[in-house]
Image: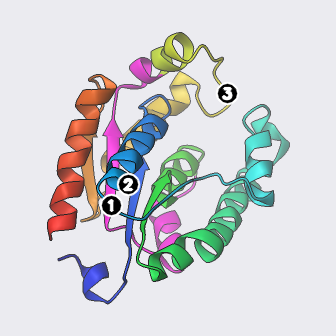
Amino acid sequence: MNAARKAGRPGILIAIEGIDGTGKSTQLRLLAGELVRRGHEVVATREPTDGPFGLKIRELFLNRGQVSPAEELALFVADRREHVRDVIEPALAAGKIVLTDRYYFSTAAYQGAAGHDPEAILRENESFAPEPDLVLLLDLPPAKGIERIESLRGERLNEFEQEQNLRRVAAIFASLRRPCIVRIDAAGDAAAVHGLILAQVERLLAS
């Protein structure tokens, strides 16, 4: 049994992380559906949120230069504080399984790529945000992620998705070391990756 659940937290927190194009949203949807089918109460959420700070962050997708790196980081932290207070902590207290598409590990990686200290970002967030019981870190080469964004999703790359930036982000993700992190090979099709994820979640639920 992991430390968070030993401490008496009724619910379970699972974060799905990785660079853009790894299939996080698809995998969260598949996992949520399977857990609900098995009778679990699930809260599926995401960051940035749809709250006021999250909406400001989404504006940066088109023009990241409108704020300084320090202001950008502050927006992500403020958005997470609201997310933790209004969604994550109440759901955990109610004994639900919370699945979040991105969490503070993404902030460490993406803001670290912008020049901040990733470990300092982790420490700041861990001072107020619940540590996940499991982080499913989807691993995919940046070029493949970009191919998926452009070919499969038919989207243009936003400010955060440029290949040079994603290479820096991927390197930081690769350097992160926390006991809750499990790396998942995201190169296969959605069903294959879902199977890898489900095996890890089943192991967590059985602990």
Residue denoted by label 2:
36
Q: What residue appears at the point 24 percent right and 52 percent down from the top-left corner?
A: 182
Q: Which residues are magenta?
A: 116-145
Cβ–Cβ under 8 Å for marks 3 and 2 = no
Q: Earlier in the sequence, mark 3 or mark 1?
A: 1
Measured Cα–Cα span from mark 3 to mark 1: 38 Å
Name the element at disc 2. Answer: helix
Of badges 3 and 2, nearer the viewer stands 2
Name the element at disc 3. Answer: loop
Q: Is residue 78 above or below residue 162?
A: below
Cβ–Cβ under 8 Å for marks 1 and 2 = yes
Name the element at disc 1. Answer: loop
User: Residue 66, percent across and down?
Assistant: 84, 42
User: Residue 98, percent across and down?
Assistant: 45, 63
Of badges 3 and 1, nearer the viewer stands 1
Residue denoted by label 3:
158
Q: What residue appears at the point 58 percent right and 50 percent down from the top-left corner?
A: 111
Q: What residue appears at the point 47 percent right and 14 percent down from the top-left corner?
A: 147
